[in-house]
Amino acid sequence: MASTRIFISFVILAVSVPMISATEFVVGDEHGWTLGFDYQAWALGKEFHVGDTLVFKYPEGVHNVLRVNATGFQQCMAPASTQALTTGNDVITITSEGRKWYICGVGRHCEAGKMKLAITVQPWIASSPSPTQAPVSAAAGSSSFYSAWTLLILAVLMV
């Protein structure tokens, strides 16, 4: 019974710590995702980490969000197969480190309205367990149950 409580407490802690350390960034802050805003200046000085979220807020039907590569960012073009986010409250959880590029694909919003964001994502914050390398406690008993929780967390983070 005591080992079950320890195990459950450990699982709750392991699940909670990474989520607590993640940061939610509302792109453009109070301006949101809109025409004529300097998103590169907005991103300057901010540290983005794996596990953080980007929230793109805009009036539904007016804009969208497309994840593109460096060329797509420079040319304000996305491949036809790129799926647009269109809810007006689009939440993107960052699941890998490196450069990330986002544009608005409506009309000439990217080119003329400067609706484009490029960020560099750093590794998971060192003070918390990595979502792919969370520790397994020997006191927790079988690690297969914990591994299932880890896979569930990863699945949620990657959506």
Image: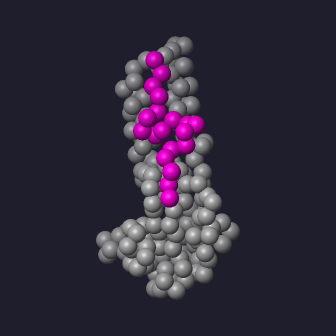
Q: Is residue 94 visible in the rendered structure shown here?
A: yes
Where residue 84 sits, quadrant-wise, is bottom left
Residue at the extreme right of the image, as rendered: 30
Q: What residue is drawn where x is 43% and y is 70%?
A: 66
Please state the horizontal and vertical placement of residue 14, each as a whole percent of the image. Answer: 52, 32
Magenta stretch encompasses residue 137? yes
Q: Is residue 6 above or below residue 92?
A: above
Question: Viewer-proximal residue, 87 or 151?
Answer: 151
Q: Is residue 61 visible in the rendered structure shown here?
A: no
Q: What residue is drawn where x is 50% and y is 67%?
A: 118
Residue at the extreme front of the image, as rendered: 45
Q: What residue is drawn where x is 43% and y is 76%?
A: 74
Looking at the rendering, the stretch of residues picked out in magenta corresponds to 120-138
- Magenta span: predominant SS is loop
Q: Is residue 97 left or right of residue 23?
A: left
Question: Viewer-proximal residue, 156 or 101?
Answer: 101
Q: Is residue 28 left or right of residue 78?
A: right
Q: Is residue 103 above or below residue 107?
A: above
Number of numbered discs on residues: 0
Please state the horizontal and vertical placement of residue 129, each as a whole percent of the image. Answer: 51, 35
Q: Is residue 61 above or below residue 82?
A: below
Please state the horizontal and vertical placement of residue 32, each as a whole percent of the image. Answer: 62, 70
Magenta stretch encompasses residue 116? no
Please state the horizontal and vertical placement of residue 81, each as a whole percent of the image. Answer: 31, 71
Way the structure is coloured: one colour
